[in-house]
Structures are given as structure tokens and as C-alpha cells.
Image (spheres, rainbow, N blue to C red):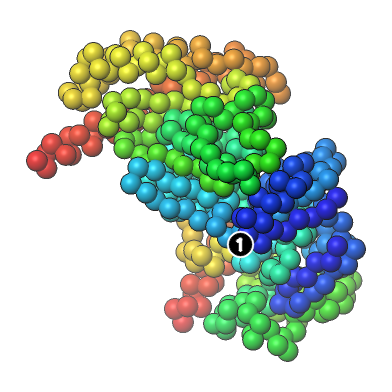
Amino acid sequence: MRVNLTVNGRPQEADDVWEGESLLYVLRERMGLPGSKNACEQGECGSCTVRLDGVPVCSCLVAAGQAEGREVVTVEGLAEYARQRAAGRTPGAPEARAGESASLDAARRWQAGGTDSQTGENIELAPIQQAFLDAGAVQCGFCTPGLLVAADEMLERNPDPADEDIREALSGNLCRCTGYEKIMDAVRLAAARRSEGATT
Amino acid sequence: MDFLRPASWEEALAAKAEHPTAVPIAGGTDVMVEINFDHRRPEYLMDLNRIADLTEWEVGADSVRLGASVPYTGIMEHLSTDLPGLALASHTVASPQIRNRGGVGGNLGTASPAGDAHPALLAAGAEVEAESVRGRRLIPIDAFYTGVKRNALEPDELIRAVHVKRAGGPQQFSKVGTRNAMVIAVCAFGLALHPGTRTVRTGIGSAAPTPIRATAAEEFLNAALEEGGFWDNGKIITPSAVKRFADLCAAACDPIDDVRGTAAYRRHAVGVMARRTLTWTWESYRGARRTTEGAA
């Protein structure tokens, strides 16, 4: 079957989608967006977390057909999403999207190995992404995309979270490398930078 | 596999009548796991997400009509006053991502003995609104669970909503697991005080082939509270009565040994949760009485 949906601000179409296929599979295998990770396929690990019409969900548990006509934001679109939010525009709204750069095509062109992408230099990341790098909250990196999407959404709702709020918001995202202290540090850092930015 | 996309409830009922084997999918938190793991290959998958009515709720005089697809997040945010037991249970479901998608309709459809909503529904008192092209009926929650992952729905029926009694007194929910999140219940217990009818209702999860009420324990406690005039005098319930209630709740269980826990542990834990939830709710009831009397 054919599925039409909006991914990171751009209308997309997927053909020959199997009826039992997950949104995660469509994103990774049909749209070339491997940022959302495939680990448990049962909603336990959160590494496939995306925003579906703004709401954080496990994309492995959304049937592709259920995403028909809906808006999806993946980790590849997070920086642009955050930029539009900071500019006071409704992220994902069609008028705000025209001519913006973080398209699916741009995300597809992205390659690991370039100096910039390895170091993060000269690439404007979302504040939460920058905070994860600065706090050393990334080890193997497999859980990171899901954590970024979930943490970014929490900070959108709750700019000044208590530690319990962070723990609860990230309770559906498992990390098996670092433990969670650096991740907590990163989210606290992003929140602190945001409140500093708001007061200056 | 065919993917059915009814745009309205009427279309969904017609599709289910035409294809009784169609598996409804809403939040997908049960169905997609089975498909991802190749445990299930339904002939038809029927998406209910396009039916907006299913995500709405209405607060009536006596009960809340809760749409089958209202996500747990919505129950926690909007219904914690009217349905406190269910809101507490909702908060223990998995993780934010799952609570954003899953709802009570799916919990009832799956009818797992470990479903978190069941003890709260049993304790509060509820009816499941099932519908087919043949008509609509309300199934009392006590009659809904018919076996392990089996329910009273006919093949052509869909769950439209669940009607849950609005709380007339304190309610509690307790769940045993290895962590605070992402955990399937080892066992769970719901308890609701109904001062209007001077009754206490219970719900036990994951400790029998289906979710159950501890009816013998309820009958004992209702009689003890009545006899001692507790609903009026607001005294602390006699410890021996609390213990007897907890023992009867444990005795109501018919658990199994499995990877999550032994039958003996489940029985013990249900007794502990029964004692605690009764104590918590009764303290809350007494506190509310004192406040009311103080103001009068």
C-alpha cells in the first residue's frame, strides 16, 4: 500500500509498504532516515522515539498506515524543529517550512565521516543535542536519538524541570552504557542554558 | 494482510461485521508487538486512529464515558478527580511514549490478567460499551473477563467506550514490579471506597487467570464496617478486621509461578497491598470527614 506523511516538514510518499509494517521500518528502510534506532521492537527501549503530530511515541509500535496524513519529526529534523520553535514559529507548520533546509534530502545527504559531522563543528545543533555533547552524555550512541527527542519534548512543555520530572520523562528510554547521570547532566545543562538565554 | 481505514465509527462497525477476523489497532502497544515478533499475522488490520470520537470523554452525573482510545496520558491529566484509581493505574503504565498511545479500550480488548487498568475498573465499578451493526450493549466489568486474554466480546463487536463510576470516595492503586517504569505487574491491587452505598470494592491484577474482585473480602469488610458504625463514626478500622480483609484478598487469588514471581509471593503481596490501600483510603476518608465536620 502507499503511505503519505510529512517527515521533518516535507511531504513524503512511501510505496509498496507492507500492511503490518511499522513506521520505524518506513523511516529507516524506505526513507533512508536511520537516526531512529531499531532495538527492542516492543516499546521497551525508546530508541525509536519520534514525534507523531507533536507527541512522543515509539515508532516501532505505530503501524505505517496509521501515520497516513500525519506529521512526523525524527532526530534528523530535531535541530530544524528546535530552530523554528525558538523563532516563535509553529514547528512543522507548512508555511514555516518553505525553503527551510533540514529536509529529508538534506538528511539523506548527511554522512558520517566528514570533519564537521564528527566533531559537531560548524553544524548548528539543537540545544539539547549540543548539551548532550558538552555533558559527555553519549557513549555508544544507540539510545541517544530517542533520548534527544524525548528530552527536547519535555523541555518544550517544562522548561525548568526538577530531577524527578527529567527521570519520569526519560523513563521510557533505556541506556545500557553510561548509566544515566551524564544524561541527567545534559538535560539540566540544556534547561539552564535556555533559562539563561531567556533572562539575558 | 489488508489494512482497513474506517473514517467513522459506523464504517468501523460495518467493516468489523464484514470481516469479523479483523484485528482493531489503536495505540498499537499490544498489536504491533505481536506483529513485529511474527506472533500474529491477522488477515485484516483495522486502524481506529481516524475515529476522533474514540479519544473523547464525557463526565456525566454518575459516571464518566471514557472513549476507548483516550490515551493514558489524557486520563492522568484530565480525570484524576473523577477517576482517581484509574488515573493512578494509568500512571504506572510503561513509559510516557506508551501512555501517549495506549488506552483502556486496548487494555480491555487484550484482556491480559496483567493489564494495569483492570483492577481500577473493577474497584470503581464500570461497564464496557460494546457495539456492532446489530446494536449496542453494556457489559458489566465483572462479566467482561472470561479467561486468560479472553473477553465477552462477540466477533463482530468493537469497544466504543467504558463507563466508569465517578469516585464518591477515596481510591487507591498499588502495583508490584521490579522498577517504577517499564514494568509489567507481578501483581496489582485496586481499592475504592464508596461512601454513598457504604461499600468497598476491590480489583486484583496478575494473580488469577483473569482480573478479579475479592468478593468474599469485600463482603466481610462491608459487614464489619456496617456493624461497627465505621462509616458514621470515622474510627480507625480494627486491626484484626484489616488483617482478616487482607487475608481474604490473598485467598481470592489463584496465581501461577512464572518468571515474574511465584504464586506464593503473589498471594502474599496482594495481602500486603490490600492492607495498605485500605489503610490509605480509610485515612483519607476520615480526614475528609473531619474537614467536613470542622467546617459545619
- Percent coordinates x, y for residue B13 in the rendering: 66, 50
- Percent coordinates x, y for residue A172 in the rendering: 64, 49
* Badge 1 amino acid: Val
Q: In this view, does A149 lie to the left or right of B267?
A: right
| Residue B38 shows up from this direction | yes
Residue at x 24% of width, y 30% of height: B286
Q: How many labels does the image show?
A: 1
- The correct choice, above or below, for B150 with respect to B37 in the image is above
- Percent coordinates x, y for residue B87 in the rendering: 46, 44
Q: Quadrant of the C terminus of chain B?
A: top left
| Residue A37 shows up from this direction | no
Q: Name the residue under label 1.
A: A55
Residue at x 77% of width, y 41% of height: B21
Q: Quadrant of residue B108?
A: top right
- The correct choice, above or below, for A145 with respect to B107 in the image is below
- Residue at the front extreme, as displayed: B134
- Percent coordinates x, y for residue B143 in the rendering: 54, 27
Question: Is residue A172 or residue B202 the one in the foreground?
Answer: B202
- The correct choice, above or below, for B40 with respect to B248 in the image is below
Residue at x 31% of width, y 35% of height: B169
Question: Is residue B147 or residue B73 the one in the foreground?
Answer: B147
Residue at x 18% of width, y 25% of height: B232
Question: Is residue B52 or residue A133 the one in the foreground?
Answer: B52
Instruction: Report the chain holding disc 1.
Output: A
* Few, some or many residues within 10 Å of mark 1 (<14, 14–19, 20+): some
Q: In which quarter of the image is residue B220?
A: top left
SS category of the residue bearing label 1: strand
Q: Is residue B196 left or right of residue A76?
A: left
Question: Is residue A60 or residue B192 the one in the foreground?
Answer: B192
